[in-house]
Image (cartoon, grey):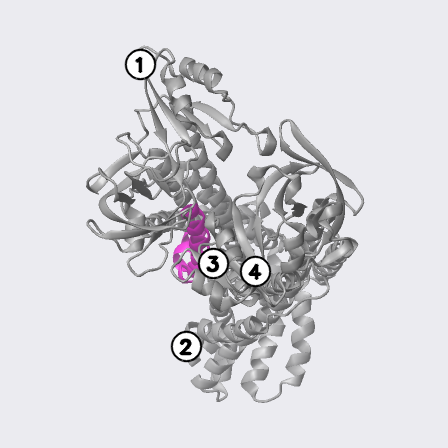
Amino acid sequence: MLRAMLRDLRAHKGRLAMMLAAIVLGVGFMVATWVIADSTARTAAGAPARTDLDVAVQAREPEARFSDDDRNRLAALPGVERVAGVYAGYAALVGADGKLAGVWPDRAGTNWDPSQRFTLAAGRAPERPGEVALGETEAAAAKLKLGDSARVILVDGTSRRFTVTGLFTYRALGAEPTPSLAFHDALFGDRFDRLELVAAPGTGQAALADAAAAAIGGSRNPSGSGVTAPVRTVRTGAELAAERDDLAADNARSIREVMLAFAAVALLAGVFVIANTFTMLVTQRTRQYALLRAVGASRRQVRRAVLAEAAVIGLVGSAVGAALGVGLGMLAMAAFRTAGSTVVYSVSPVGIGAGFAAGVLVTLVSAWGSARRGAAVPPVAALRSDAAIPRRALRVRLVVGLLLVAAGVALVAANGGTQLDETMRVLSVSGALVAWIGLLVLAPLMAGAALRPLSRVLSRGPALRLAVRNAVRDPRRTAATASSLVVGLALVTAFAVVGTAFTAVAGDSIRGLVPASTLVVEPALDGARLPADVPTTVAATPGVTASLAVPRAQIDWDHGNVSMSAVDPAALTATLHLPIERGSGDLGSGVVLLRWYADQFHVEPGDRVTLRFGADDSREVRVAGVYAGWEGQPGMFVDRSLVPSRYRGDVETVYAVGSRDALEKAFQDRPDVLVSDREEVISRLVAEFEFVLSVIYALFGAALVIAVFGVVNTLALSVLERTREIGVLRAVGAGQAFVRRAVRLESIVITGYGGVLGVLVGLALGGVLQHVMLAREVWVVDVPVPLVLVSLAGMVLVGVVAAVWPARRAARADILAAVAAE
């Protein structure tokens, strides 16, 4: 049996090529993901650690920063050799082109010191006022070089010129943000953000850290969030190095988990390709298996032979896929390497092993059904040339599929309201997945039901009739081939629906909150904070009649963490319009809560909640109202007079009513500040989301490529299966062009069916996702018409391209040999 199996593999290498390609792509994607994640972690962890630091005392809040007295107090502790102070502050680097360099200005500036924080890559350190050293990556982004005059905007809005004297790389401590500008000047006030202690010989780090914590009022435990987080932390150098490594590992884990989800989709598409291929191969070998059974082979031996063949194919495909994945992963790491950085490549045995395990397991699982069918056919029956699918199997498939679809739809319908909590979201997504599985189970029945009427309607030309009837002849094969297309196309369509819904929800939410006459002043870089001078400048601009500074801070409340904006109630009324759904928008009578939080935690107007601003500072407030919006907007508006002063800073947006020309003139020399209207804000937000969707579409591309291989494979094996039929057609007068056209049209019918089903499934899945993510009505779907049309046209093109090789092979078959074939 082993020799027979190996002989089959050698004799039919061409029939297995597309199946191998599916395994190679799926495993390659998976291994590449592991290489990228592990290399990212090793690169971060492999960066040189600082050896000149024993203890770091860090301030987490501006009010907790350190004075010279604090530094002197620590310097006087026994066992302290020296104490250095580190500043961090707002510094916006303007490039040679006059535009803001792509670096977040928050905490981008620091003071130069001779510590191991900095490693000079070129030039020298800044030694006098008016000099600056830049990070290598930031200098490249700003197109600045040694000796150039760099323009820097500081937190008070002033703009200064500095001579670039050096380029550096930076060694961060733990989760410290990496600064991009280091100055000689004292630009960030007289209080330090961090104090770094160097121990005298013979003094242990832990003992010194304990003494520093007692002297400065800091905590040795950095854990906690919100009010439970200490405002001053004391860590040893070893603890910070371990924190850096843990952070790198966490980032790598996040990358791996996200990318493996896309790899799983690619492998799922491969399952359909492999299963369909084995089904066709087993069908073509029925006489061969019958002869083996007749000469004494048992059912178990036949089944094992098929599974052994699958295992060999899985091992070969996994080996090639693993090699491809390692290469792709290394290329990706090299492509994203920044200036001055060093990449540490890591090929984990775990990643290689996982890729092999997935490739072999997927192949074996896909071949299991075919192995059972091949072993179950009696020797006498197998010698017959006709092999029909048992009707009972289709009846079981119908019952199981309908039950799954009904159960899934019921789950979605039961959680179809717009007021969703976490459990309802999980149930809705679970219902959608169950219904999707049910549709895949029903796919052969749907293929027959959809294509049989089509074969009667389409009577234009014998080639088209033949193509449709060939597709209808074996609906399982057609459905299995189309299902791999359905997987990728449905997910692409679903995310397109989410993108369309996001555009509508975000646009409606912003338009509902921001009147058309209100202008928006924002940071030029998304996610940054405005400099301290901007709210004052806006309010003082001639022609501005009202302005509102909107800070954003995270605080604790009864239900965990919430983003809060502490604002002036009168200014809020003059500039914005809160779209109140329930209750009142009067901040004088309580806080106004975003609907998402109200629905998630079942909070209604009139309820009382507790806001926690510190370990000993809690305030109970009334919920005045609930406003409609999306999750990117503040979770809570509160009267600024109710909150401590530290929660009124970090302004991220200023809204203003007045002359746009006057505001643009006020900020005409400020590339770190944007003046926009609400439609421009919406356009930028939508563009950012569309970029994310483009990346998602590209990652789903592997599944679609595998599906195309599946179509080619099915057509090639189908042509081989119908060799005699094609020979008869040629013998009665059909030309090569007719045969090519028939195969090409059959391919288009299969891909067209897969395209239509994929789009319909994607629209339904997208409706559920938009419901879960954006709290929209699940039954109201905005169809992404351009993407649907492009997808359907693309499926036709895929059908044409996939049929090129099989159609040419069919057309060139020798007529006499084909007629004589069995």
Horizontal and vertical percent position of residue 226 = 59, 34
Q: Which residue is mark 2?
A: 808
Compared across the picture, whether 167 is left or right of 513 comes to left
The disc placed on residue 200 is: 1
**Discs 1/4, front:** 4
Amino acid type at circle 1 is Ala
Q: Which residue is mark 3?
A: 695
Q: Main secondary structure of the magenta part?
A: helix
Residue 14 located within the stretch drawn in magenta: yes
- Where is 118 relative to 377, above or below? above
Amino acid type at circle 3 is Val
Secondary structure at badge 1 equals loop
For the record, the magenta segment spans 4-33
Q: CA distance from mark 2 to mark 4?
A: 68 Å
Q: Earlier in the sequence, mark 3 or mark 2?
A: 3
Q: Which residue is mark 4?
A: 656
Horizontal and vertical percent position of residue 505 = 64, 62
- Where is 237 relative to 364, above or below? above
Is disc 2 in contact with disc 1, using a CB cutoff of under 8 Å? no
Compared across the picture, whether 406 is left or right of 269 comes to right
Q: Earlier in the sequence, mark 2 or mark 4?
A: 4
Q: CA distance from mark 1 to mark 3?
A: 52 Å
